[in-house]
Amino acid sequence: MNDIVCFEHLTQRFGTLTALSDLNLELRAGQLSALLGPNGAGKTTAIDLMLGLSSPTQGTVRVMGSDPRSTTTRAGVGAMLQDINVPAGLGVRELVTLYAALYPSPMTVDKALTLSGLTEQAKQRVSGLSGGQKRRLSFALAVVGQPKLLLLDEPTVGMDVQSRNAFWQGIAELRSGGCTVLLTTHLLEEVDRAADRVILLNKGKLVADGTPSSIRERVGVSKVRFSSQLAGEQLRALPGADTFTFAAEGRASFSSRTPELLVRAALDADPDLKHLEVSQASLEDAFLSLTSDSLTSPGAVSA
């Protein structure tokens, strides 16, 4: 599989701040990868480098085998960033048409409007769009050039459920045509559902890289939930209970690294317990664990 993006020993400094430190990373053609990390992890810096908006302090960055600042490379990259700055007095179709003219082989304007769910707003002025509709317009402008690489920064912020569903349908269609997608988001349930790969940064370093399920497995923690007549003090004292809280409707909720031990102890203490559920740690649990200062190390955890 060809690499669409390649970072080799890439370091980016801004004065005394090291935003990225000796980062080695490849984005494989056709994948949907999620670039995650807390604020200040280096995500925006990495995207800026892919877009050719800055040059690395050390190391190299290649996009489709070339310098990301070259005209040819830029023609193959689409970006949906958080802020959109376009002429508010133009119509939606008019603006998408202008953007399409910037690319050598754009998709039709109608297709871009359909993918972004803006067909009904095609004749509307940009100034009259809602916040969610402006996000969809940003998506249309990012994809109208038929990019080989699509970079999405918090793409579904401000979208309602219907708009999000339409957005992900559009992403699926683009991927079916071979488009490689990299997104940043704080909505980890979307990552868990849609991403092939999770790339986790913390303080400019790569701390984990793998499928969502393999990242969750790194944490080694399970969630255990059940309903019981036991008192809170008894539940908290059960062997294998690392953390304990009361969840919705009075259900006991535990985090446990030894769920089998916890379940056996709970059944011994209360044979009548109900609604037992054991599940793997969430991606959010893994995110918090792997980006905590105590667990961050110079080397990446591959999964």
Image: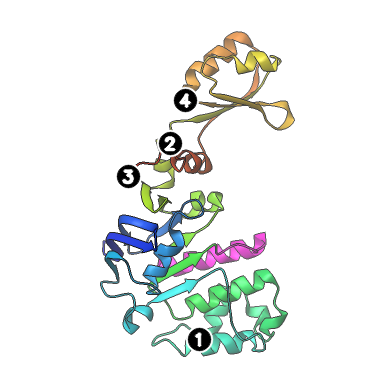
Type of amino acid at the residue the image marks with label 1: Tyr
Quadrant assignment, res 252: top right
Decide: is 268 above or below 258: above
Residue toward you, 277 or 292: 292
Residue toward you, 20 or 94: 20
Decide: is 16 above or below 254: below
Which one is in front in this view, the residue at disc 3 or the one at disc 4? 3
Q: Earlier in the sequence, mark 2 or mark 4?
A: 4
Which one is in front in this view, the residue at disc 1 or the one at disc 3? 3
Which one is in front in this view, the residue at disc 1 or the one at disc 2? 2
Cα distance, mark 4 to mark 1?
52 Å
Q: Residue at x 45, y 43 (%)?
A: 291
Label 4 crowd bin: few (<14), some (14–19), many (20+), radius 10 Å: some
Cα distance, mark 1 to mark 2?
47 Å
Which stretch is magenta? Answer: 155-180
Quadrant assignment, res 181: bottom left
Residue under label 2? 294
Asked if residue 257 shows in the view, the reply is yes
Q: Earlier in the sequence, mark 4 or mark 1?
A: 1
SS category of the residue bearing label 1: helix
Residue under label 4? 257
Residue 104 as seen in the image, left or right of residue 233: left
Residue under label 3? 298
Residue under label 1? 99
Position of residue 177 measured from the top left corner of the image (x, y, whole percent): 40, 70
Q: Earlier in the sequence, mark 3 or mark 4?
A: 4
Q: Residue at x 47, y 38 (%)?
A: 289
Type of amino acid at the residue the image marks with label 2: Ser
Residue toward you, 69 or 182: 69
